[in-house]
Image (tube, rainbow, N blue to C red):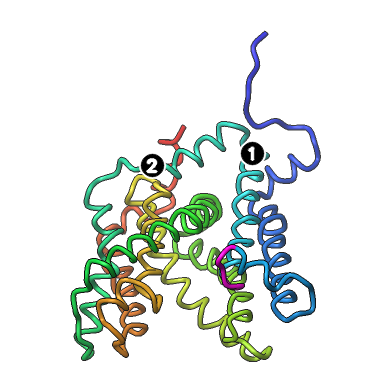
Amino acid sequence: MQTIIGPRQGSAPRSLVQRQPVAAFLVLGVGSALLLMTLAILVDRGLLPGKSVPELFGLEMERAAAGLSILALFPAAVVVTALEGGRPAVRELLTRMLRWRVPAGWWLFALLALPTSTVLTAVLFGDSAHLPGWRVLGGELLGLAIGFFLINIWEETTWAGFFQTHLERRHSFFVAAALTGLPFTAVHMPLQIINGEVASPLDLAVAFTLLFLVTVVVRSLFGMVLRGAANSILLVAVMHIMFNRSANSDGIVADILQGGENRQTAVLLATALLAIVLGVIARRKLSRSYRQELDEAER
């Protein structure tokens, strides 16, 4: 007897997910992530026990909460993918997650474009650049590896590989990026509450708006990398970790600029400039028809 493994019809949950995979993910993944991170906030405020638990693993509460969000989002993306398309769809998602054979130019872009352009922009604004020592560079490589393997590869499999890809099948490229930015921003808000950047509902509204505007640009840039690098989620995850290490106070750009005052402004300008330039160069690949070409190439 021949067994065909693939998307099956019949059960009400499966049929519902197949009709509305994005909505199913929002409920299952984003809902679970926000619930877990709300519990982390309550623990951090002392309203629930366990505030010292993250310290046992050498983590701050903010990083522990970020990890909890990944534990909700990535499995939800895989479950919805399995319910929607069966094992072939899951295999496709995981294959894209590990796809490293892409043109060398995209590897160079993902690794170097943001930190290089951020440093150059900051220097133009008056900051000084210094080559870090080998010890600092070694620590940076360790930070890159930890961030990539613990957070970014799973995060971008969720957002670029599953969520934004699904939206691109129904909407224009930039609309899909903006719509992806809404839940992406939402799951980052609890982190700002934990680290003390948000202290009131007004602070929350302002923080959400500002982060969303930045996220639309960032997700557009990441989506362009996804399109250009043969649908590789791996390259988007590399681009994401390089964005983080360019923007964070403990990243490679901060090490190079050594306390420069213009780093945050520089990384935002550099990201916007790269998105504009890449959007012009790769504009043919931003069409819905090209998304269909990429989807067909996976089959």
Q: Quadrant of residue 217?
A: bottom left
Say which amino acid is labelled 2. Answer: Arg
Dot 2: what SS?
Answer: loop
Going 31% across and 54% down the picture, which residue do you hit? 284
Going 65% across and 32% down the picture, which residue do you hit? 7
Image position of 277 with respect to 3: above or below: below
Q: Nearer the viewer, residue 254 or 181?
A: 254
Instruction: Give the magenta range.
Output: 57-62
| Left-right relation of 204 to 108 | right
Going 22% across and 48% down the picture, which residue do you hit? 104
Image marks 1 and 2: residues in contact by CB distance under 8 Å: no
Q: Nearer the viewer, residue 180 or 270?
A: 270
| Left-right relation of 100 to 188 | left
Image position of 63 with respect to 78: above or below: below
Q: Which quadrant holds the N terminus?
A: top right
Dot 1: what SS?
Answer: helix
Q: Nearer the viewer, mark 1 or mark 2?
A: 2
| Left-right relation of 28 to 89 | right
Q: Nearer the viewer, residue 12 or 265?
A: 265
Q: Which mark is residue 82?
A: 1
Q: Residues within 10 Å of mark 2 (few under 14, many from 20)?
A: some
Q: Quadrant of residue 6?
A: top right
Q: Position of residue 25 (x, y in %)?
A: 66, 54
Q: CA distance from mark 1 to mark 2?
A: 20 Å
| Left-right relation of 165 to 81 | left
Give the residue pinned by disc 2: 99
Q: Which mark is residue 226?
A: none
Q: Position of residue 216 (x, y in %)?
A: 47, 71
- Quick one: label 1 or label 2, which is nearer the N terminus? 1
Say which amino acid is labelled 1. Answer: Ala
